[in-house]
Image (cartoon, rainbow, N blue to C red):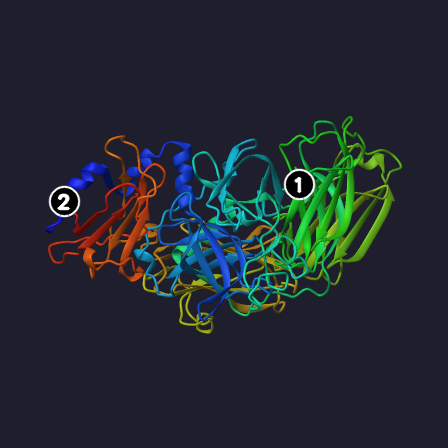
Amino acid sequence: MIRFTGPSAARFTAILLVLSMLLVAGPALAQQQTTLDTRMERIGSATVFIYQVQDADDNFLITCVGSGTILSRDGLILSNAHNTVQSDVCNGDTLIIALSLTADAPPFPVYRAEVAQADEGLDLALLQITQDIDGREINRGDLALPFVEIGDSANASLDETIFVVGYPSMDNEPVQIVQGTITIFTEEPTGAKAWLKTSTSIPGLMSGAGAYNRAGHLIAIPTTSPPSQLSRDENCRRLQDTNEDRIINSEDLCVPVGGAINALRASNFARPLFRAASLDLQVGIEGETALQPTGNPQISRLFFASSVNSAGFPSTIVSSLPTGATSLYLFFDYANMTPETVYELRVSTNNIPNPTYSLAPVRWSGGRDGTWYIGSSNQIWDNGVYDFTLFVDGIAQNTASIVVGGAAPAGPSISDIVFGLSDLDGTPLGNGYVLPTGNIASARLIYRNMTEDLEVTERWFYEGAEIYRNSGVWDMSIFGPDGARTISIQDAGGLLAGTYRLELYINARLSATADFTVAGEPQGAFPEVFPAAHFATAETPEAAAEAPAGSSFTSEINNLYAVFDWRQVQQGTLWTARWEVDGDVFYERTFRWDDTLNGENFVIGLTRDNGLPDGTYTFGLYIDQVQLARVEAAVGIGQLPIDIFADVSGLQLQGYIRDVDSGQGIAGVTFVLISEDFSVIDFVWDAEQIYALATTDRNGYFQMDRLLEISNDAVTIPYSVVIRADGYLPVEADGFVVNNE
């Protein structure tokens, strides 16, 4: 309940009746926001402009800029990593958050923020508001900012209408909406909908903003390439007199603003970061360092496949596709890449640029070395000659071509390679792609349309070097034209731990390929790679290695450590660590093993300064997407509190201000709550006097940017109110009180 006391109450109430103000609290307003325009306005109020600056005694030097979106009422903001996380090019030390105070106003600097979570490869970052613009600390629980909901990007569909909301320029323009449709989903090993593509041109400064469906859910983040030293003077603006010669010209620092965007990072990639940031969870790996590149980035071994299996390898390699084909993937090997590497795919059809299948320059998310693919499915590829050219840091690396059209090829093929240890019938046993150490490894393959006199070659590689080759003429009397076959590689001294590759050729043309990893000690046909995995709690990682294992811990712990041993893991082997809480992933990273072949007590820590939230925590270890260890433990009651993401106290004031005669909402009304230390007569529009403020949108709706404290029998917390609107008499009153009645 909201009530007014004191000598001004009667006058204030009368004027409220003239203005026809309706005050509501809680979620009731959401039920009234049924129109798309209203949704977009609410989204606009949760959209921010971000300045990364160098702070020299509050004299801000702008280094990078971009848009962002508020995801929680306590000030978590989603944006791109390239314009917020400090780097050689974006080398600022402070993040300034600017908001539009009205729907048609340019952004105004209000807060400072810090990076809470980031994934530079995915180019996503979660920022947390920590201070006001003057540097005074803010209790995040006191904030009550407008925010949007992350949608499930897996449910997005082709031709679906989307709305991109962000700041298009730095020319004092307000938030704008760019409408488009989803033209294609670009797939990568990171996911079937790694990128959402639209034919609509999105301004570069909207990088880091939000793309929404009609329900108003954020389903993607527009993303452009990060600036580099070489490209800094391209697509940039000179905003300040950085050399202090009293003029702004070509001698001043040019701030990158990016080029047009047509690739949007799917929102589901932001969910783990948001989960971790919301819970204040930090993961640290003891002794793990990123391996540095050993040379310049390289891309090689380009080929096409019509489908990809669950392990991320090509099912069938193709040199052409028939008319009506709906799936096509370009595979390639890469080396010496980093999260700051920029890669780009340019596709042309019959020598005409084809932006639908191209990927504009974006950050690299695949690690230092390995195999990657990019492509699409469930989309008909028109007939024609397609040329695919890959660029790294703006330099063309390699090109491959394929023809789409005509009848389905009926030539010979080999596909669907699976690895394991063979039983007596020649069937590989195991998990398919991670084999225990031993003296033999087998591969099961499918062949079709084989004929007499075909030359078939098998080539086996270990850590990139060929170790065995065998060629022969296909024997129809033994194998026939169609079927399955098992081939093997063996070494009497034992196959070394590490990464292996098998390539199969028909008449010197690559027909099938896949990789597998040898690691761990044999447990039948399965490897034991990470034994003795368990949870422990301790003050330090060193102490955790000696602490007893546990599966249940009290609510007061600040640290939870995953501890495990390892067996036969070769340096350079890719491995993945994944953390979950109550079934939701909040951390997943893939690393290149940089430790000894065997060892004990590898420690990965999960920390939170004020105690881990109650919940069921799960830790998993993977190689080649194969789960090799998994442990689970309960903290406290073993379940996150239902309201943990709304752990704020007080009342959020929101409502409408309408003209009593017309019944229409009044836009641009300023509603100010003055701190209890001041009254209306003291108010001089000083920021220190303002407890909270809001400005109505075009429908007359407002929402305070901070929660109001609730009075009770023991304590009364009065606020003073000042309301200003052009063309209306001012409204002022002391004694504004909120209680639970």
Label 2 sits on residue: 11
Q: Report whether residue 425 is seen.
A: no
- Residue 701: quarter of image: top left
Label 1 sits on residue: 375
Q: Is 644 drawn above or below residue 248 in the view shown?
A: above
The location of residue 286, given as percent across then percent down, is 52, 69
Q: Is residue 429 left or right of residue 386?
A: left
Please state which of residues 208 and 699 is positioned toward the viewer in this rendering.
699
Disc ID at residue 498:
none
Q: Is 251 drawn above or below residue 673 in the view shown?
A: below
Please state which of residues 274 and 45 is positioned toward the viewer in this rendering.
45
Q: Is 406 drawn above or below residue 389 in the view shown?
A: above
Single out the mark in the foreground, 1 or 2: 2
Q: Secondary structure at mark 2?
A: helix
The location of residue 672, given as percent across then percent down, is 27, 51
Q: Is 253 drawn above or below residue 206 in the view shown?
A: below
User: How far apart are the alpha carbons under marks 1 and 2?
Assistant: 67 Å
Q: Is residue 712 left or right of residue 341?
A: left
Mark 1 or mark 2: whose residue is earlier in sequence? 2
x 45%, y 59%: residue: 96
Q: Is residue 41 left or right of residue 734?
A: right
Q: Secondary structure at mark 1?
A: strand
Do the CB atoms of the residues marked 1 and 2 lie less than 8 Å apart?
no
